[in-house]
């Protein structure tokens, strides 16, 4: 039986890019269908694969660069609610966020198997859920392929590429001399635990057998979480050969553990035993779609910020040998660090030949070299949020084609929506004409000289050290009190009608924050509510308390009042944080 489902946007793929695209679009008023082929959301970040989510801050090595917006909302809530680092709870958090949105219909265990195309336009996505013996025809004016492998776009005939371009294709010095079909390989991860007593490992007879020489450029260590360099299959077709790649990666993962336990080289592993091993490869690369703009090495290394920038990245250009673990004499990765952040333009997130197809994640429009940076999941997440905002603007403006987003006025509208939703865009400030705070002045009875009250109205919601890029001004862009409790006021010359108040707090963007099974990386962050975040506060209008909040764990809070109130002086009274001795606020906004 086929069900016809109608929506404003159909998102295919429930990894972090797809989740953020769906949430972004739904929160901006669109009816969304989210199609995911697994039972859980999160893709490579889910409990099925358990790769930690890295991004532009490079594990905290670039302070101030951590992604905000929806991915920050997820990471902050996970850290507070899941200090024990359970991947099942992370799965449930993603599920909770998606199912809590009334504008999203979530179809789990559902495969996109094709699309109906008329001319250069997708009119419906065709999907099937075998577990319930159902098929779906999802009709929408716009589609977003966030599936990684790009199944919908591929079936619709969207222009794409696979493999490594030649050096001459885009003039990239890090590219191969000649093009080839090779890609980055896939990995299977495993976790282990110290049981406090000897735990033998009896290896199956079908595993790979390794010697010390096989690990000439690799080091089996950190037994609790391993090993990202258990990588293989980039020389094959990572889509159609995935079953063979999975089998070989299982052989490799068990072979690595056999070497650790039984070679005699690692006597400190005697009490350790495998607790979990992935049944799915974490795939790094397959198809990449082609948009009007293809991001290249030069864009990344030059820290280019485009007029239509809607997301950003900053992870190093991180190239791996296609043979992975079989490239014994090659380093498992080659990192080419970037001087700062780079922008990702809207034109790299929609198809150049299919009129209504967006995409986000590892299948974005980028050369292989540039992809080696953009592929990491926090970067994919901010792309997804951008696509959700782009789709909202396209639908609400009556646009027929994704290319309409290249119109400067619509691109600027997308950017302002993203800033309002707590995304960060390099060099772009809040210029929302509907924000009543733009017409107020900010005051505080006490403030630090370098963190004045006026900073909450300067349009930037994070510190911008000059290490982030040439656009960065080195400012703190933050009000700080000298003690607690503390009051921050927005004052207007005459009463204004206020229905909605936005508050952006500090959440410690100078640190890494991610769910990880690695004790090393976990030790560099704080699991729990972040100490800078304001926990208890109230909003007061001309002496009357509008609302009180206790136990807040988030950076961005949006308060919609039951009824509009006329306000001449709005006070944010901060009573407590999760650890800091002063209040820290980046922005206040107000809307009628």
Image: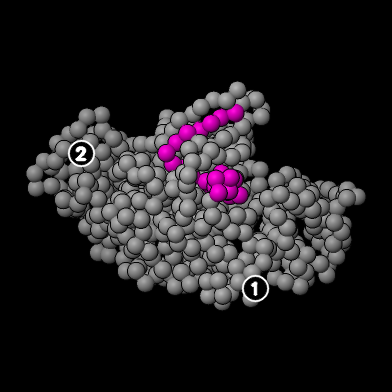
Q: Is residue 195 visible?
A: yes
> Which residue position holds label 2?
592
Up/down of 507 relative to 183, above or below: above
Work out which quarter of the rendered image holds the C terminus and state it: top left
Apparent side of residue 38 relative to residue 119 in the rendered image (left or right):
right
Answer with the quarter of the image where residue 275 lies: top right
Q: Are marks 1 and 2 in contact (CB under 8 Å)?
A: no
Q: Position of residue 460 (x, y in %)?
A: 31, 58
Residue at numbered disc 1: 178
Camera-side residue of 494 and 42: 42
Label 1 crowd bin: few (<14), some (14–19), many (20+), radius 10 Å: few
Report helix, strand or loop for mark 1.
loop
Residue under the point 46% across and 69% down: 299
Residue 237 x %, y %: 70, 55
Question: How many numbered badges does the structure rendering display?
Answer: 2
What segment is highlighted magenta in the picture? 135-157
Q: Is residue 573 left or right of residue 241?
A: left
Residue 507 visible in the displayed image = no
> Alpha-carbon neighbours of circle 2 within 10 Å: few (<14), some, or many (≥20)?
some
For marks 1 and 2 on the same chain, the one whose residue lies earlier in the sequence = 1
């Amino acid at each position: 039986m086929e069900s016809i489902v109608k929506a404003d946007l159909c998102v295919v793929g429930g990894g972090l890019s797809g989740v953020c695209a769906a949430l972004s679009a739904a929160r901006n008023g669109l009816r969304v269908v989210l199609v995911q082929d697994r039972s859980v959301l999160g893709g490579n970040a889910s409990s099925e694969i358990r790769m930690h989510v890295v991004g532009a801050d490079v594990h905290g090595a670039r302070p101030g660069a951590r992604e905000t917006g929806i991915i920050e909302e997820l990471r902050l809530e996970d850290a507070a609610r899941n200090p024990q680092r359970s991947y099942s709870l992370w799965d449930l958090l993603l599920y909770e966020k998606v199912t809590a949105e009334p504008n999203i219909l979530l179809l789990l265990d559902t495969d996109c198997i094709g699309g109906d195309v008329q001319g250069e336009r997708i009119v419906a996505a065709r999907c099937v859920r075998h577990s319930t013996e159902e098929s779906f025809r999802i009709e929408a004016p716009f589609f977003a392929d966030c599936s990684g492998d790009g199944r919908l776009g591929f079936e619709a005939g969207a222009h794409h590429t696979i493999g490594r371009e030649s050096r001459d294709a885009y003039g990239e010095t890090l590219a191969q001399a000649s093009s080839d079909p090779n890609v980055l390989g896939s990995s299977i991860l495993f976790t282990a635990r110290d049981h406090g007593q000897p735990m033998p490992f009896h290896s199956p007879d079908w595993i790979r057998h390794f010697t010390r020489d096989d690990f000439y450029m690799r080091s089996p260590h950190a037994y609790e979480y391993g090993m990202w360099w258990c990588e293989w299959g980039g020389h094959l077709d990572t889509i159609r050969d995935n079953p063979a790649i999975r089998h070989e990666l299982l052989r490799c993962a068990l072979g690595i553990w056999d070497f650790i336990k039984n070679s005699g080289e690692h006597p400190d592993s005697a009490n350790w035993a495998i607790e979990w091993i992935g049944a799915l490869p974490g795939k790094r690369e397959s198809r990449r779609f082609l948009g009007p703009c293809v991001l290249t090495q030069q864009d990344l290394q030059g820290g280019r910020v485009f007029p239509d920038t809607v997301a950003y990245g900053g992870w190093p250009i991180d190239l791996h040998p296609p043979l992975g673990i079989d490239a014994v004499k090659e380093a498992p990765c080659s990192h080419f660090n970037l001087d700062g952040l780079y922008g990702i333009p809207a034109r790299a997130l929609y198809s150049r030949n299919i009129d209504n197809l967006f995409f986000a994640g590892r299948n974005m429009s980028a050369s292989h070299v540039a992809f080696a940076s953009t592929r990491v999941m926090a970067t994919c997440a901010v792309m997804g949020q951008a696509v959700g905002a782009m789709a909202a603007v396209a639908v609400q403006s009556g646009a027929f084609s994704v290319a309409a987003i290249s119109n400067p006025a619509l691109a600027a509208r997308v950017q302002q929506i993203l800033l309002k939703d707590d995304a960060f865009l390099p060099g772009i400030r809040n210029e929302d004409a509907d924000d009543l705070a733009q017409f107020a002045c900010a005051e505080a009875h006490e403030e630090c000289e370098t963190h004045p009250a006026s900073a909450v109205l300067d349009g930037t919601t994070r510190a911008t050290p000059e290490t982030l890029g040439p656009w960065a001004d080195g400012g703190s862009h933050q009000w700080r009190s000298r003690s607690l409790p503390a009051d921050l006021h927005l004052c207007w010359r005459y009463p204004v009608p206020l229905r909605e108040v936005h508050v952006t707090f500090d959440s410690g963007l100078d640190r890494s924050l991610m769910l990880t099974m690695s004790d090393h990386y976990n030790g560099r962050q704080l699991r729990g509510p972040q100490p800078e975040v304001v926990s208890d506060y109230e909003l007061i209008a001309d002496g009357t308390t509008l609302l009180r909040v206790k136990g807040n764990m988030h950076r961005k809070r949006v308060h919609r009042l039951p009824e509009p109130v006329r306000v001449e002086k709005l006070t944010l009274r901060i009573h407590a944080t999760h650890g800091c001795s002063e209040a820290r606020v980046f922005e206040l906004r107000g809307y009628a």
